[in-house]
Image (cartoon, helix red, strand yellow):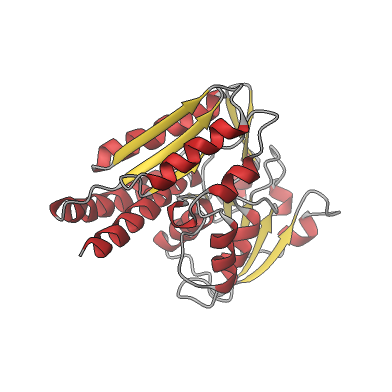
Amino acid sequence: MTAQVLDGEVVAARIKDDLARRIAVLRDQGVTPGLGTILVGDDGPSANYVAMKHRDCEAIGMESFHRHLPADSTQHEVEAAVDAFNENPEVDAYLMQYPFPAGLDFEAALLRMDPAKDVDGLHPVNLGKLVMGTVGPRPCTPVGIVELLRAYDIDLKGAHVVVVGRGLTIGRPLANLLTLKEPGLNAAVTVVHTGVDDIGSYTREADVLVAAAGSPGLVTADMVRPGAVVVAAGVSFQGRKLLSDVADDVAEVASWLSPRMGGVGPMTRAMLLSNCVEAAERRAVGRG
């Protein structure tokens, strides 16, 4: 068996085409969606990721706003940038690129953010809304994973999904999202992590396995039930090389597998754009 590819580039392109049409409608109403980014320091992967987001904005007709602060910035300077985006009516949603340089408090800056402008869906108010199943910006990578599976007609209703990883950006919110009683969700979810003995005893029971621990090669073929769907969501860097949580041999046993490049990453960026467009649509309603 060789796994079929969960192609995030193809699905993300369709999502961005739809967003471009929605943006054209907004622009006719005098509203251009605006995405803001705050980058502190000169971390290479972070800078590249932010640059990709701004290229995405340009490609579909959005405005983008960027603040690049030096690594030796004070907490006050970082929070002043947050305040400026909170107050700027042209910025519908924005993000602070993680990680911050040592000595700066990312959590304090996040709490200062206007939850309605939280494009990543990671503000505690928005995570609380996710747990409650109410409307609000939802975390981009978890929603992107769900949309990727939906695009390939992989039914999550009643499926056993095992999530490897308990991080704030993927593991925890994904587990909450998958259990919501909503169309395309309503799954049974098990969460394990690197502190659990014999992770494979759990992962081999999964209909859908999401690797999101940020531990290179953690999930190997012997940990996957033949025919399972595997989503490689966790990545880490070794120098400039991007490493996946999922070993190459998993492709020989899985039915579907997202690739290391062009899988979950494009979906995360597409859902970030979607959150920003939804915020702009709320602004347009308010103007009416």
On the rendered structure, is 42 left or right of 197? left
Q: Residue at x 50, y 46 (%)?
A: 264
Residue 107: x percent and y percent? Answer: 64, 45
Residue 140: x percent and y percent? Answer: 49, 52
Q: Residue extending furthest right?
A: 197
Residue 211: x percent and y percent? Answer: 64, 50
On the rendered structure, is 26 left or right of 141? left
Q: Quadrant of the rendered structure where residue 180 is? A: bottom right
Q: Is residue 88 above or below residue 283?
A: above
On the rendered structure, is 138 left or right of 216? left
Q: How many marks?
A: 0
In front of the other: 234 or 25: 25
Q: Residue at x 45, y 33 (%)?
A: 50
Residue 62: x percent and y percent? Answer: 27, 42
Can I make out residue 269 in this image? no
Q: Quadrant of the rendered structure where residue 84 is? A: top left
Q: Residue at x 35, y 50 (%)?
A: 92
In front of the other: 100 or 234: 100
Q: Is residue 58 above or below residue 110?
A: above
Q: Quadrant of the rendered structure where residue 285 is? A: bottom left
Q: Residue at x 62, y 54 (%)?
A: 210
Can I make out residue 87 in this image? yes
Q: Residue extending furthest left?
A: 28
Question: From the image, which quarter does the C terminus lie in?
Answer: bottom left
In front of the other: 244 or 274: 274
On the rendered structure, is 61 left or right of 92? left
In front of the other: 123 or 257: 123
